[in-house]
Amino acid sequence: MTTPAELTTLLTRVDAVIVDLDGTMVDTMGDFSAALNRMLNELALPGIASAEIERMVGKGSEHLIRSVLNHVMAHENIADVAMKTEAIFPAAWSSYQRHYLDINGSCSAVYPGVVQGLDALRAAGLPLACLTNKPLAFARPLLQAKGLDLYFSQVFGGDSFERKKPDPLPLIGTCQALGTEPVRTLMLGDSSNDAQAARAAGCPVLLVTYGYNHGQPVRAVDADGFVDSLAELARAE
């Protein structure tokens, strides 16, 4: 685990911080599960367990919906799964958007230590931007509902740029909006998507150990450090 002294060294190397949303600041698995299962019910398809959804989260809503449809139909032994997924995707996307906006934030919770960590970063004079693969129309209301929106000078979603994380483009664009160089901008996330995007963009990266990393151990990811809670940022020496 990254020590307080190592965290201090890392923070002194940067001029701003980019923070992921799902799995980093807010546990949104309940929101995902509720919206996706309502969508599946509308499509007359069987439901899906949260444990399965967790392995699919992180690459944007379009990828999530396709992964869920593929998984459910494969388990139903439906032929030509990929073709049928694409055929029903427009209806699924419309349904998911409607249900997610309806329940957004009601089945989710801010992780312990997040507010303390954000307070510590703000007290250190570091501008903060939120960068998520969640659509911006979902991200902004969620941040507001959880009282986190005032921490961020910039908020970008999965539809804010032409490509999503793990592509480096969203990080590079966020750095430009912050007016900082990537090498001096910390990516704070929970998964290999965040780390890969950061490495490709030239940003240092710090990962939390409690989020969604496609069912894989997060400590195996190439990162500059790991924390069990963002509150550890408040204890940096």
Image: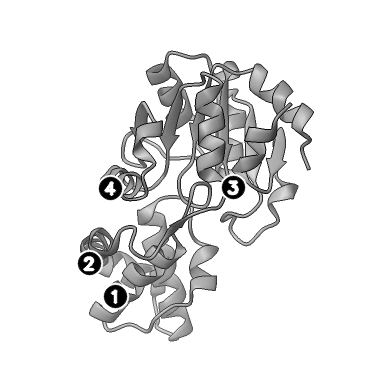
Q: Nearer the viewer, mark 2 or mark 1?
A: 1
- The residue positioned 74% from the left and 48% from the top of the image is 220
SS under mark 2: helix
Q: Which residue is mark 3?
A: 191
Q: Which residue is mark 2?
A: 95
User: Where's the C terminus, which quadrant?
Assistant: top right
Horizontally, residue 144 falls left or right of residue 9, namely left
Q: Residue 218: x percent and y percent?
A: 68, 51
Q: Nearer the viewer, residue 235 or 72?
A: 235
The disc, 2 or 1, on the residue closer to the chain's N-terminal end is 1
The disc, 3 or 2, on the residue closer to the chain's N-terminal end is 2
- Please rate how many residues cluster around mark 3, counting C-alpha atoms within 10 Å: few if below 14, some from 14 to 19, many from 20: many
* Disc 2 from disc 1: Cα separation: 8 Å
Three-letter code for the amino acid on which mark 1 is drawn: Arg
Q: Residue 46: x percent and y percent?
A: 37, 84
* Disc 3 from disc 2: Cα separation: 27 Å
Q: Which residue is mark 4?
A: 141
SS under mark 3: loop
Q: Which residue is mark 1?
A: 38
Evaluate if marks 2 and 1 touch, with contact meaning CB atoms under 8 Å apart: yes
Question: Does the image show residue 42?
Answer: yes
Q: Is residue 75 above or below residue 222?
A: below
Three-letter code for the amino acid on which mark 3 is drawn: Ser
* Disc 3 from disc 1: Cα separation: 27 Å
Q: Nearer the viewer, residue 101 or 37?
A: 101
The disc, 4 or 1, on the residue closer to the chain's N-terminal end is 1
SS under mark 4: helix
Q: Residue 64: x percent and y percent?
A: 41, 60
- Which disc, if any, is residue 18? none
Evaluate if marks 4 and 1 touch, with contact meaning CB atoms under 8 Å apart: no
